[in-house]
Each structure stands twice: as C-alpha cells, then as structure tokens.
Image (cartoon, rainbow, N blue to C red):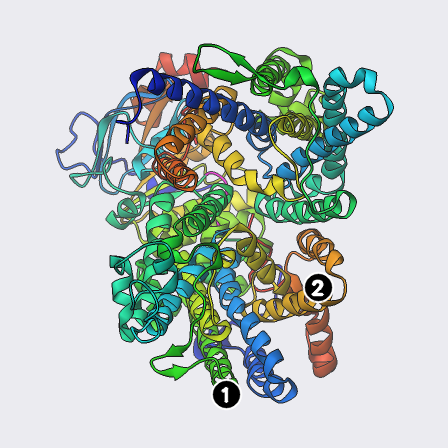
Amino acid sequence: MLGDYSLGDLGAIFAMQGFAGLILFSVYLLMALGLAIIFGQMGVINMAHGEFMILGAYVTYLCSSLCQSYLPALFPIYFFVAMGLAFLASGALGMLVEWSLIRFLYKRPLDTLLATWGLSLILQQAYRSIFGAREVGVELPSWLIGSVQVTDTIEIPINGLFVMAVTILITLCVALLIFRSRFGQQVRAVMSNRAMAGAVGIDTEKVDRYTFGLGCGIAGIAGSAFTMIGSTGPTSGQLYIVDTFLIVVFGGAASLLGTIASAFSISQTQSTLEFFLSGSMAKVITLLAVVGILMLRPQGLFTLKVRR
Amino acid sequence: MTNPVQTLTKSVTVNDNPFMKPVEWLSLLLLAGVILVVLPLALDGFRLNLVGKYLTYAFVALGLVICWGYAGILSLGQGVFFGLGGYCMAMYLKLEASSIENTKIQSTPGIPDFMDWNQITALPWFWQPFKSLPLTLILVVAVPVLFAMLISYAMFKRRVGGTYFAIITQAIAAILTILIVGQQGYTGGINGITDLRTLHGWDIRTDHAKVILYFVNGGLLIACILAAQYVKKSKLGRILVAMRDKEDRVRFSGYSVAGFKVFAFCLAAAFAAIGGAMFTLQVGFMSPSFVGIVPSIEMVIYAAVGGRLSLFGAVWGTLLVNWAKTSFSESFPDLWLFGLGALFIAVVLAFPNGLAGIWREQIEPRLTRRVKGLRAPPPAIVPPHGAPAE
Amino acid sequence: MNAAILSSPVVGAEAAPPDHLLAVEALTVSFDGFKAVNDVSFYVEPDEIRVIIGPNGAGKTTVLDLICGRTKASAGSIKYKGQELTKLSESAIVQAGVGRKFQTPSIYDDLTVFENLEISFPRGRSVFGALTFKRDAEVRDRIHAVAETIFLKDQLRERAEFLSHGQKQWLEIGMLLIQDPELLMLDEPVAGMSVGERIKTAELLNQIIKGRSVLVIEHDMKFVEDIAHRVTVLHQGKVLSEGSMDRVKNDPKVIEVYLGH
C-alpha cells in the first residue's frame, strides 16, 4: 500500500499524521486534566464530565454569536473572553453539583457514578431543550483560519496550533496550581489525609468544593477549545467520556505526568493506526490495547509502590 | 448480653436456612401470577410483546442483583453480554433466513444480505457454528460467559475492583459497539441483524408465536430467579456478602476471592445472555444499540430502582422503569430524560435499596405488626443483607 | 489476669531443634527503598507462644502480613513445616494451617454471628464447594461449641454489626478457632478493650492456644509477661533482641529504645 507514494510524500504524510496526532493529544489532554483532578485527586467518578465540557462549548458558541451581532469590532479576540466565561460557567455549575449531590456520596464511589450519570442525562436534555438537537459550530475569527505552509507538501492548520498552545498553557497553570500554590498544597493535604488536614485547620469541605469546581472549570475550557476544531451537539460529551476515563486511569490516577504521557501515547497510537486502518478499527485496537494493558497493570503507567 | 431473648435451642432442630421464606414464596407466586396470568389476559398482543421485551431486560437486572448488590461488583458492560447472547441467536436466525432460495437474487446466494452488500462472498468462519440450532443454544450462553471469564479473571486476580472495574467494563462496551458498527460486512453494522423469520422452520413473526415466546420468556425468567435464589441462599451467597464487607477476612479464611467474584460476574453474564437471546426471538432483530454504554448503564438503574439486593425487586423495577419510559416518551418525549436522570439521582440519594428497601423498611414491618398483633417483637428495621456496597 | 497454664517456657533459642514449625530467615521487604522489615530471622516451635514487641513502625504488623502472604517479601524465606510460604497465595497459606487475626476487628457486619462463624468453617472453600455446602449437624454443633467458648452463645442470630467492640474481637477469634489453624497469628488482641473484656480475652486465649503455636503482637506489657514463652523485639525493621521476657527486659539495647520511656 505504500508503493504508490514517493519518499517525500511519505515523509509529509507522516509529519501531517503526527501533527493530527498532536492535535488529538491536545484535545485528550485538556479533557483528561479536569478529570484527573476530580477522579485522581478526589476519587470521584464524574460521568457528567463530558457535559461540563459541552457547557463550555455552548458558552463559547453563545459568545461568538453575541459578539458577532453586537460587538463585531471585538470579534477577533472574543475567544479569550469566551474561554474565561466557559471556565466560570462550568466551574460554578461544578461547585453547585458538589454542594447538592457529590458531597453526600464521598464514601460511595459507585453510587456517585450512577448519580452523575443521571446528572449527565439531565444536562443533555437541558442542552437539547435550549440549543436544539442539531450540532452547532462557532464562527472562527479570520486569523485562526488557514494554515501555515511549512514545506511544499506539509501544511499545519492554525486552529490546531492554537488549541495546542491553549493546552500547554492550561497544563502549566494546573501544574503550578497543584504543586506550587497554597490551594494546591491544601488539596494534596486533604486528599492524602482528610482527618489530619481538618485537624490542622484546613476547611476540607471548601477544598472539596473548589477542587471539584476547578476540575469542571477546566472541562469547560476544554469544551471551549474544542469548538475551534469541531461542532457541538447535546450528546457530544458522551462520545468522549470513555476515552477520557481510560486516559486518566491508564496514566495512573493520581499522577499529572502520567495523564500527559497517557494522553500522548493513546493519541499517537490512534492517529498512526488511522493511517493504516479504518478509523473505527484504529480506535478499537487502541482502546483494546489500553484495556489489555490495564488488565495486566491495573495501577496504570505511573504510580508509587505504597504499603497497603 | 444485648439481647436476652433467644431462640437458640430451636435453631438446632428446625431448618433455619430454608430455600425460600414464606414471604418469598408469596412474592414469587405474585410475580409468576402477574407475568403468566394477569398480563396475558389483560393486554393485547402488541402490548404483551412489549412487556416480553421489558422482561428480557429483567434477566440483566437479576444478574446485577447478584453481581452488584451481593458481590459489590458494578458492571457497566452488561449490554455486552446481553448483546452477545442476542447476536448469537440472531446469527442462527439470520442464516436460516438466508437460505439459497431466499437469497437467489444476491450475487452470492446463501449468505446474509448485508454480507452480500459488502462484497463478502463466503460465510466467515465465526458464522459457521450458527448453522446448527443445538450448537447455537450452547453458544448463546457459552460465548458471553467465556468472554466474562476472560475479562474478569485477569482483573480480579490483580485485585481490580470497584470503580476501576466499572470503567473497564464500560470501555469494553464502547469497544464492542464500535467494532460491531465498523465491521458492517460481518455484523450488519449499525442496523444490526434484521429481517429474522424462522426458528428451525417455525415462523416467529406470527402473533401466535409471539405469545408462545412470551410464555417461554416468562418461564425462563422464573427459572433464573430460582437459580439466583439458590445461589443467594447457598454459602456462596453469604461469601459474596462477606467479601463485599471485608475482602481480606474472606481471603484469610482460606478462600480464593477472585474465583468467587469471577463466578458472580459470569452468572450475571449468563443471565444477561439468556435475556439477549429471548430479546432477539421476541423482537425479531438485534443491533449494537443494545450493546453500548447507554443501555448498559440503563440496565443498572432497573436493578437499582427495584432494589439492588432483591431478586423480585429487580424484575418489578425493570417493568416499572420501562413502563414509565414508554408512557412518558409517548406523551412527553422531552421530559423522559429529565425523569430518568432524576431517577438515577433519587435512587442513589434517597432510596439506596430501591422499591424492595421501601417495602422492607416501611410496609412489611407495619403489616407484620398488624398481623401478629401484640405478640410480635419490635420490628427489625434492618434489611437482611444491609446497606449497599461501599 | 492469671496465666499460670502458660508459664512453661519451651526450648531455649540455643537448643532449637531443626524441625521448627515456622522458620523465618533473612526476611526483607522494602517499600520504595524504605526497608520496613530488614533481614529478620526467627523461629517458632510447636506449641510455643511467641510475642513480638517493638515501638510503632518497627515492622511488627508487616512481619505478620509477610507470613500470611498479604505482602510479598523482597528477599528471604518463610518456611512453615518445611513448606515455603512466600510463593503461596493467601488462601493456600490459610489452608496450610496459618490463621490470622487483624488489628481492628475484621468481621462481616451484614451477616449474623452464626453466618460469620460458618464462613470460617474449613469445608466448601472452592466455588463449587460453597455452592453445594450443607449446614449439617457437624457444622451446627461446632459453631455452637465455639460460640459458647467465645461468650457469644446468646448472640448467634444477631447481626455482627450490633456487637460491642470486645465481642467483635472475640467473634474474630472464634472465626479463627473454627478454622483450627496450627499457627495462630494475633495482632493486638486486647487493644481497645475494657478491663473486664481484657480478663475474659486472656482467659479465652489461654483456652485456644492449647495444641497450637501462637504469634502475638502486643503492646500491653502486663499481658505479654503473662502469656509469652519467648519475646522477639523488633526495632526499625530489625530484630533487636530475643529470648525470655526476663532476658529481654534486662537487655540494655531494649531498655534504651522501648521499655525505657
């Protein structure tokens, strides 16, 4: 099957495919980051994570439409505002959900899973009632359209580059927040020893609420970035929930580095396989490989050996 | 010390662990009466067939009671086993419907129509066994159970449980759906396997056949309830509860914990597979929409609504949720998802033991008090095997 | 606390016969480079009561975890009646005759006292065996006898959840009794008990250790003095001292790290 291409063509194909993989990696990583915080740090299985992401996408869609109609002058930069609003909207909804639902279920992780699934159904229907069942897309400002010509045969879409830049930025922010800030210190303290953290004066309930809100807010940003490269429908979130959970689990639930490594390996495997196989088989083989590895090594890629 | 009243001397002679308590016999009688007598008399053919379809989901819910309620293993991939059982049956029926004379207009007669459309010219190897009915009946249960064993043994040996297991089973449901949809030529793709006609020459599409299949389905369901009851009442059932509580203690009492979990999971898979096969027979097709994540998790809610610890509750829960779904989506289609979502949340937050829990905690003690009058001791509020897992 | 029956010390360490019931040799386990148990060796003889003492974090519970297979050793060997345990699964170790009681009472809250005891009955341990297990007269009689021993005769039909802390400890001891192990390992059997319960527990332990070897972790020095034939002192994952209670008590190294304060 490779015989029809010249060597230069092949190189270009691999470069483009690799870049497609990098965009997929960015999307996966953005989605997984929020979940890594919620599931990895708090041990909560949030099946509605995809819906928090879609909320961010819809907020961006609203911003884009409103901006186009009322403030066309600001259109080129609306996206940055939209991203901030997406973070706030998803984060606020997340905190509300934590307060009204999740906090009663910390000792029953499997029940959390069912309850958040119920939440995801409600959110899906709410999106459908408000925005309609059809998928919506946002209008991109002109500077995000087009591609950068690297060589004669290799060109890279600008929106893809933008999503990658956003991903790197958000990842850095999360890493700083978790490992350098006072809030991150409190989060890690609460997660490693709740009773002790409470005893030294940390308001554990507040930390829980903000942590959950943070995870959901990052999902909102992911959804916002996602509108750059795809359209959004009420059930789009559900399509990604399995991949996202697998990425987090595969990376080793409590490890940020593991999440990055796992998002990278899964996205690269999938996009490389897509070159040789149909899209669905590439996905099947990638997921099967991940599941197979997890069966043999349930702790994921990166974990500490701890006394149990 | 805390309870000076004792009935100990009696327990040595009287069988204190009967197969079913009187109240359980009554529940069984009630359920059998409703399924096998009341509903067939009260409903027309179309509605009865609909109830028959619901009851195939009850097999899955029944398995979940053992696997999730008793053993504490939540599987979000029961659709996989339901689907595998259903597909095995559908493959047999499809081959019978694709006889050479039925398919003589195809470019390759004698193979299923969707294969012909996808330029496949010979029957793939994994379709071959389904030419035989006895072999099919075995494979309907064997394929899902072996698959369940394969999945669960590796994981339970490595002490994977709880949320991880739920996520992995869910991923497997997703993978299988993508695979079935993607491999259209071998599986019928997104439409599934349709246009099924006869079972060993017997036309399953007639009204008469549908009524008979309904009764077969009901009979099988009651047989499965009895089988589940046997497991629940055996020492194995108590070991499952014990494992849910203190897995290490069971291990250090000399049991290989993984083996018991594999058993519970495989039993649930077997029940689901029987349900799937009966679904195919009664509804006349099988498609990937019964395999994936959404149906799998919806089946969990049937068991949760009925009561995750109650075999009879699971059947009632299935009937109730599906009845609600049908009537809601007929009159207010937009509201159904809100209702279902709220049901998930309510059952978890307010009624973790479902309908059966409400019955046992609220209604039964009152009834007992009324029946037994003053002789009865204060009602024990705690249901037999207690709170939900984790 | 009267433990007169127990005060006949078995063989001294010097004259140890070659057929030890349990031989732990050069046992080491490390967690991320930290050696929780470091080159530990000791021998337990038939019918001996051995107490392991040591400050918190000395590796006492880890040693029991290693013997019963809960934690896998990094190096060293554990031989039980000549059989290497480090390679066996937990259930196989139990079936070989090693019983283990956990530090916090580990019983099944949702089952009755009777059912708790029944699960420990050493029959029907395979999946199929459990499915066809019959609650016959032998099972009943044995459970009733044990319930009598552990002072829970009147609670057989009660859910274990409603027992007091002491009763839960007794129930777990009863579960081990039904199992009838040759080597019984107890992790702080009297911790968190009232004085009355403690006396009863000592009485109970005196009864059940007959005809078997016992390995006990305990902090309560009075209790240790009453029951121990020999004492092994662990400190920072290593054996610091070993011998009779008197000898250990007067060992300057032990006084410095443990008994001294």
| Mark 2 crowdedness (10 Å alpha carbons): few <14, some 14-19, many ≥20 | some
Secondary structure predominantly adopted by residues drawn in magenta: loop
Residue B16 appears anywhere in the view = no
Residue B115 appears anywhere in the view = yes
**Mark 1: secondary structure:** helix
Q: In x, y percent, where is residue A54?
A: 67, 36
Considering the image in quadrants, where does the N terminus of chain A appear?
top left
- The reply to whether callout 2 and callout 1 are in contact (CB within 8 Å) is no
Magenta extent: C103-107
Report the residue marked by disc 1.
B208
Residue at image location 25% in from the left, 59% down from the top: B122
The correct choice, above or below, for A258 with respect to B217 in the image is above
| Mark 1 crowdedness (10 Å alpha carbons): few <14, some 14-19, many ≥20 | few
Quarter of the rendering containing residue C67: top left
Q: Nearer the viewer, residue C105 or C170?
A: C105
- Left or right position of A210 against B94: right
Residue at image location 71% in from the left, 44% down from the top: A123
Quarter of the rendering containing residue C129: bottom left
What is the spatial separation of the Cα atoms under label 2 and label 1, in whole angstroms? Answer: 28 Å
The correct choice, above or below, for A8 with respect to C169 in the image is above
Pointer 2 indicates a residue of which chain? Answer: B
- Left or right position of B139 against A20: left
Report the residue marked by disc 2.
B329
- Residue type (three-letter) at the residue carrying disc 2: Ser
Residue at image location 56% in from the left, 57% down from the top: B300
Q: In x, y percent, where is residue A231?
A: 64, 35
